[in-house]
Amino acid sequence: MENRDNSLAVVAVSGGLDSAVATAIAAERHELALMHINYGNKTQKRELEAFHAIADFYKIDNRFVADIDHLRKIGSSSLTDRNIEVADYDPDVQGIPQTYVPFRNANILSIAVSWGEAIGANLIYVGMMEEDSAGYPDCTEEFINAFNTMVKIGTRPETKIELIAPLIHMSKREVIKKGMELGAPLDLTWSCYRSEEESCGECESCVLRLNGYKELGIEDPIKYVEMEVK
């Protein structure tokens, strides 16, 4: 394949649409090792199933699943706290969303870098997006750049690991289109924050995903509960 360099890249795969497309992009050029984090969120089981389905699709045997239940115990997020209901998406809400898990991505990336350094990876791919993650302070290019500086300082002198966020400036529509162009298994992904059975279609993640498909004029391949799409 043109421009393929066969270096080893770790991809942090949540099981969602964005990380599946990041995987597809990385697969175009690198050998892959896929990582997933169970952090005590309400759809943890379903996301893990999606992770393994994506890994199976790309025939990746080198996969690592870490359990960090401390984020559930810390709480303060509707994704992990069973006493906080995941709200319907409201585009007018300002500030940090209730779905923000305190410093979650720093926890995830730290584990990715640890594993990457141990197995000799040169790159860590993540599916972070600024546009569809407005309000999340750990989903920005500034955060990625700062983390790259920390990785350079905090790893072995001979370790050369760089975090890559190929979707950071893309819209959900652009991500879906890119995934379709690359043949990413979008039908195997899971985005819903609430349900592990049928996607609710009302939480932030579902609505942004549905809107992306709507802008492209195509139907989302995953199943939603019967409802009027917002």
Image: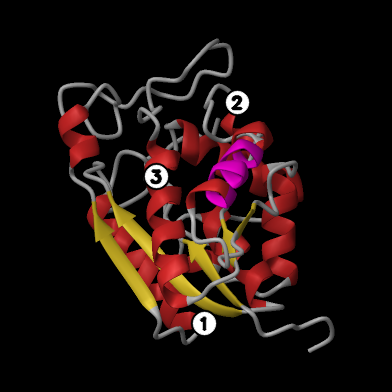
- Marked residue nearer the N-terminal end (3 or 1): 1
- Distance (Cα) linking label 1 and label 2: 30 Å
Q: Which residue is mark 3?
A: 192
Image point (46%, 67%), residue name: 117
Query: Can you tell which of label 3 and label 1 is closer to the viewer?
Result: 1
Image point (56%, 54%), residue name: 126
Three-letter amino acid code at disc 3? Cys
Residue 210, can we see it?
no
Q: Which residue is mark 1?
A: 58
- Marked residue nearer the N-terminal end (1 or 2): 1
**Residue 28 in the figure: left or right of residue 207:** right
- Marked residue nearer the N-terminal end (2 or 3): 2
Label 1 element class: loop
Residue 48, can we see it?
yes
Residue 98 located within the stretch drawn in magenta: no
Label 3 element class: loop
Q: Which quadrant is the C terminus positioned in?
A: top right
**Residue 224 in the figure: left or right of residue 159:** left
Residue 151 located within the stretch drawn in magenta: yes
Three-letter amino acid code at disc 1? Tyr
